[in-house]
Amino acid sequence: MNPLQVNLGGLILKNPVTVASGTFGFGREYGEFFDLSLLGGIAVKGLTLKERSGNPPPRIVETRGGMINSVGLQNPGVEAFIKEEIPFLRRFDTRIIVNINGDEPEDYARMAMALQEADIDSIEVNISCPNVKSGGMLFGTDPEVAYRVVRQVVENTRHHVMVKLTPNVTDIRVIARAVEEAGAKAISLVNTFNAMAIDIQTQKPVLVRKTGGLSGPAIKPIALRLVYETYSAVKIPILGMGGITGAQDALEFMLAGASAIALGTYNFVDPLAAVKTLEGIEAYRKEKGLENLSDLVGKAHR
Amino acid sequence: MKLMTGTIIENSRVTDEVFKIRLRMAQPFEFSPGQFINIKVSEWDAPLLRRPISISRRMDARTIELLVKEQGAGTRQMRFFKTGTPVDFIGPLGRGFNISGFKKEAPLLILGGGIGTAPLKGLSRDLANRGYTRVYVVNGFKDHPYGKEDFECYEYVEIDESKENRFVTDHVSASLNETDFQGVFACGPTPMLKRVREIFKDRGISVQLSLEEKMACGVGACLGCAVKIKTGPFDHAYKKVCVDGPVFEASEVIFE
Ligand SMILES: Cc1cc2nc3c(=O)[nH]c(=O)nc-3n(C[C@H](O)[C@H](O)[C@H](O)COP(=O)(O)OP(=O)(O)OC[C@H]3O[C@@H](n4cnc5c(N)ncnc54)[C@H](O)[C@@H]3O)c2cc1C
Ligand SMILES: Cc1cc2nc3c(=O)[nH]c(=O)nc-3n(C[C@H](O)[C@H](O)[C@H](O)COP(=O)(O)O)c2cc1C
Ligand code: FES
């Protein structure tokens, strides 16, 4: 058997390295740098029912060890994605993870229905986007709403359902249990942290919507702790992310309880980061003499 | 676009704030004027993100020159890049100036503001090499003009705004009736670009503006570098400066 294979609640990845939604477009750009078939999976840019133009600039601001973004789910809409992007992504031997978003709870079920016949491998229900006026993160901070949104997706799809959680909550375990109960097959976390930057010349927030989502190495220790907590609260597997830059970070997430991991912001810094992470993980597995990489998952809990 | 390595063969002072870097690649390096590269500034990820810098001009088949103005942490570190050390960059990136469709004897106008003059050097040389004989350049500087010797053109006007009470665009407005420009290429601060667009608004000629926006990936993946662009009489969309630009036709740009 392939020693790197992981089972994310029925979604089989050939290796645990994936890339995070919104940091990898639909794969075309980074496909110029390496063979996308090397990846365990690709989470595509967050989609909505209808095309969305996104937020006005500036959309990003760099802060120490990270960046705050306010892209606002700019995307071509789910139909255009199905027609134009799936055929491209299917040319590669990797899992297609479709990040879905909505303004109201019912939008998620509509998205699931729109994707019913599509040739994809997983739906990632994003109830954690901090950069939109309605919906998004609001659904991920209330366990009852989270349950309802996820339940509707599960009832309306034949696909594997994963739920992406926001770290902007008091106790992530409560939300994690709610989505597990609703029928999610896996959980991905974390999305970005609510954050802000202020320009001391204009004396105003840098971003038009004042706050945005913080990502990158700065959030890693907190993301790691959240994965650790979630692991002990639910039985379904975790796709861990938040500030991962290479194999060492990735292995920490696995030890904390992540069955697979995603690189986000660091793709921007090094387009080959995901590939290098995979190489580093494989080297570690051999060095430790592990027959299956998945034996590592959650080991830090002993 | 490719992930590349260049070696610094020169890093020297131009003014107190501006310096130039010459980068040599192992292989011949192709680009067109107006394109840029996205440079990894720090081995230690501080700052984390790459910094976009225009390719100012070609020195030889394997060597390019960059002109950089110190702004913050990233450009400050570039200033201390040592001769002989490797630099990791992604490039060439973006769509540069479109110089097809002009008659060789057509008067063309290049307008630069400060560090915005960087990509225009290469543009002026490219136009000269292709046989355009009437290229006018007007460059404005807040203080200490630089770079005149690197331009190749029919007429070069330099404006030192610290001494003269006028801007590049004032010079252009005043001399407009003398020359019937067929194409305009501009790079500089946003107020200057807005003014350029106003001046040439109803003339039916190509006015190309090189825009700037904060970037994360530089390759079109993050949607961070959005600018509002007209896509029809009543429609607009956010386009990416890094792949759809940085050069846009002025009539399409919506300044926010
Ligand atoms: C396509 C493109 C080509 C460019 N070409 C050149 C060039 O040839 N020479 C040159 O000196 N500079 C160029 N710039 C601008 C350069 O990228 C920024 O000055 C640089 O990223 C600032 O980084 P920093 O860490 O030094 O400053 P920071 O601390 O990041 O910022 C300092 C100041 O610069 C502003 N700034 C930061 N990033 C950008 C950016 N991407 N665009 C505009 N302003 C920014 C900030 O708002 C702040 O006011 C270009 C920018 C773009 C988008
Ligand atoms: C520019 C940008 C855009 C993002 N867009 C999305 C999105 O559309 N949907 C989503 O679920 N997460 C989105 N995210 C969050 C990432 O997928 C990831 O959860 C987060 O950035 C933490 O990982 P990182 O620190 O490795 O980047 C985005 C992040 C960034 C930086
Ligand atoms: S900088 Fe990422 S899309 Fe332009």
Image (spheres, coloured by chain):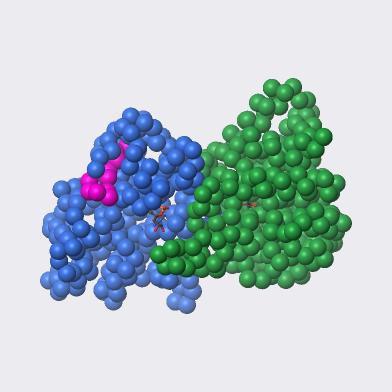
Judged left or right of residue A158, residue A66 is: left
Which quarter shows the C terminus of chain B?
Answer: bottom left
Judged left or right of residue B121, residue A111 is: right
Which quarter shows the N terminus of chain B?
Answer: top left
What is the x, y in percent for residue A128? 69, 60
Residue A95 appears in the rendering: no
Residue at point 29%, 74% (across, down): B198
Judged left or right of residue B223, residue A77 is: right
| Residue A275 sits inside the magenta stretch | no
What is the x, y in percent for residue A144? 82, 66
- Relative to B254, say whether B3 is above or below: above
Residue at point 47%, 46% (across, down): B47
- Relative to A3, say whether B211 is above or below: below
The quadrant in which residue B211 appears is: bottom left
Magenta segment, prevailing SS (helix, strand or loop): strand
In the rendered image of this protein, which colour is used for chain B?
Answer: blue
What is the x, y in percent for residue A298? 79, 38
Report the magenta residues as a range: B14-25
Colour green, chain: A
Q: Between residue A129 and residue A225, name the one nearer to us.
A: A225
What is the x, y in percent for residue B29? 35, 38
Q: Between residue A130 and residue A79, name the one nearer to us.
A: A130
Residue at point 33%, 52% (across, down): B34
Residue at point 33%, 50% (across, down): B70
